[in-house]
Image (cartoon, grey):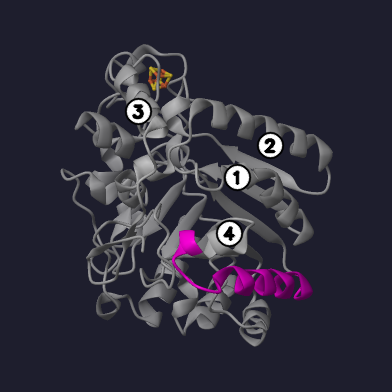
Amino acid sequence: MTTTRNGDNGPAPPLAILAELTHRCPLRCPYCANPLELERAAGELDTETWARVLDEAAALGALQVHFSGGEPSVRKDLEALTAHAARAGLYTNLITSGVLVDQARLEALAAAGLDHVQLSIQDSAPGNADRIGGFAGGHERKMAFARWVRAAGLPLTVNAPVHRQNLDRLGDIIDLAASLGARRLEVAHVQYYGWAYRNRAALMPTRAELDRATETVERARARLKGTMAFDYVVPDYYARRPKACMGGWARQFLNVTPTGKVLPCHAAETIPELAFDSVLNRPLAEIWRDSAAFQQFRGTDWMPKPCRSCERREIDWGGCRCQALAITGDAAATDPACALSPHHGALVALAEADSHATTPPFVYRRHGGHAGKEP
Ligand code: SF4
Ligand code: FES
């Protein structure tokens, strides 16, 4: 337990709320972070409820809202929610694929108080970008969208998930982001949960490819210093110590799903023993403080050996619970990305085997719950 900004006992407030407005999305990225079972449009929270959630988040002490999805611009009330969040004093960030927003709508969002845009790109080569995202013509639309973002005077971050099917062009991807006027580029090696876990063998780079990518990023970081900032996320499977996933469980973020469930992490629903409260039944502040799912892995009391006595326990907070579950079957185990985990060898062996196998076709998600193979 830490201390709130008001000095009471209890967890410090979240920095940000991730508002997953919808799971609807025109793209079908094979590493999608959304759950395997998507929530339907009919169950989505209405505008009034989202507005209340935003007010509650601001009252709780959150500083930012990330409007996310699925594709958040599918929601016709995105402008209204942006304006509401801005009035509540939240810094507003739109995380989007950019393919559904025209210039007029972007300007309307800017006028509503949007502070920042995060655009995902799949590749620098248009054909491969469209194949990966499963959306013909998507890359061209994204390029136009990025120009409109800059024309509207909004800061742009480009998110570039990388994997064995686009890593060869990492240098071009970096140049593309710079040419679009991005202030920040996130080069994120795919993390293998949910749908990405299913496509692991089609996405996993070899260790040599990872090393080359890291060199490319480091050279570009030096070259573009002062122009474009970099975030670089390496694949856990090749790490020696895990990342502090979500900044530590229930420490900095909360995630509200399209139907109102409140999760400590976007993938938390993969952990079957957790039950989640909903904004429809409980105030957000109470959920943040008391919800069983938030309490389960908050802090260090839950930790097994060797985390419990490890000097990094308040640096990485034991790594990622969802990955621990996916690899060991136990969400409370030490993250196998850690070399001190008894499962680390198995994780590395999995990565080596996947990365050297023949690349299988992508398995794409389809709305309606069925999986489809690459044509
Ligand atoms: Fe982090 Fe636990 Fe590994 Fe220590 S033993 S580095 S706390 S995952
Ligand atoms: Fe859920 Fe890491 S993805 S804790």
- The image quarter containing residue 359 is top left
The amino acid beneath tag 4 is Ile
Question: How far apart are the alpha carbons under marks 2 and 4?
Answer: 17 Å
The amino acid beneath tag 3 is Ala
Q: Are marks 4 and 3 in contact (CB under 8 Å)?
A: no
Disc on the earlier residue, 4 or 1: 4
Disc on the earlier residue, 4 or 3: 4
Task: Pinpoint residue 100: horizontal percent, then vertical percent.
Answer: 53, 79
- Tag 2 secondary structure: helix
Label 1: which residue?
Answer: 187
Q: Are marks 2 and 3 in contact (CB under 8 Å)?
A: no
Which tag is nearer the camera, tag 2 or tag 3? 3
Queried whether the magenta region covers residue 70, the answer comes back as no
Disc on the earlier residue, 1 or 3: 1
Queried whether the magenta region covers residue 143, the answer comes back as yes
Question: How far apart are the alpha carbons under marks 4 and 3?
Answer: 28 Å
- The segment highlighted magenta reads 131-153
Label 4: which residue?
Answer: 121
- The kind of secondary structure the magenta stretch mainly shows is helix
- As drawn, the label of residue 353 is 3
Q: Is mark 4 within 8 Å of ligand 2?
A: no
Q: Is residue 77 above or below residue 206?
A: below
Task: Pinpoint residue 340: horizontal percent, then vertical percent.
Answer: 37, 14
Question: How far apart are the alpha carbons under marks 1 and 2?
Answer: 8 Å
Q: Which quadrant, please, contains the N terminus?
A: top left
Label 2: which residue?
Answer: 217
Q: Are marks 1 and 2 in contact (CB under 8 Å)?
A: yes
The amino acid beneath tag 2 is Val
